[in-house]
Amino acid sequence: MNLGDWTVQPDPYPSQPWVANHGQWHFAVSRHPAGAGSIPCNGAIEIQNIMSTPTMDWTEYTEAHLSFWYYHNYDNCSGAPDWCRVEIDTAGVRTPITPIPIGSGTLGFDLSAFVGCPAVQILFVEETDHAGASAVIAIDDVTVWAFDDERPKQITDLALNRAPGTKQLALT
């Protein structure tokens, strides 16, 4: 993953109830609002903080999916909206997929509309003016999978024979 200004932090379980039973290891975190240039609760969003996957080639696929765990919370202290979201970047063209809701859980999406593209990135965008002691977005367990509809071809020209002088079998 390309982290931008996101940080990798250990799971705080069990000290934080919002990750109860989530597991171990680490997750990516972006505090609200992102970056040193952000002024919280002023009614304006100064900085986007983007974490992205490496560029993927989806030209050979007919179906693609995304799944991830999230936690998202903030204190509503601003008239500016909270635009934390998932986007797909296809060779520089960004398409919003979904806002990341307040709360925690696992989200999953069918990204098959983007198969056939030679340059695909999944972006986790933190863009908010809201702040607070628990104002954070955390992402973990990102899984991307894709496949094609072509069935494997049956191999019909193999023969099973005993290897000469042994009790072993060999494919020929």
Image (tube, rainbow, N blue to C red):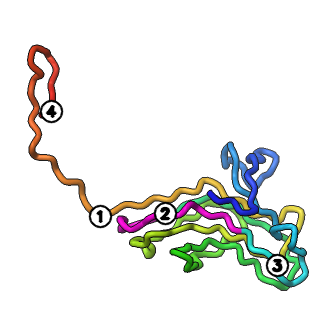
Of the numbered discs 3 and 4, the one sitting upstream in the chain is 3
Of the numbered discs 3 and 1, the one sitting upstream in the chain is 3
Disc 3 marks a residue whose amino acid type is: Glu
Q: Quadrant of residue 80?
A: bottom right
Disc 4 marks a residue whose amino acid type is: Leu
Of the numbered discs 4 and 2, the one sitting upstream in the chain is 2
Instruction: Give the CA distance from mark 2 to mark 1.
Output: 19 Å
* Residue 129 percent coordinates (x, y): 83, 77
Q: Secondary structure at mark 4?
A: strand
Give the residue at x 59% y 73%. Answer: 87
Give the residue at x 86% y 73%. Answer: 38
Instruction: Give the CA distance from mark 4 to mark 2.
Output: 36 Å
The residue singled out by tag 4 in the image is 171
Checking the image for residue 46, the label placed there is 3
**Residue 68 is inside the magenta segment:** no
Of the numbered discs 2 and 1, the one sitting upstream in the chain is 2
The residue singled out by tag 2 in the image is 56
The residue singled out by tag 1 in the image is 149
Disc 1 marks a residue whose amino acid type is: Asp
Marks 1, 4: nearer the viewer: 4
Q: Secondary structure at mark 3?
A: loop
Disc 2 marks a residue whose amino acid type is: Met
Q: Secondary structure at mark 2?
A: loop
Q: Secondary structure at mark 1?
A: loop
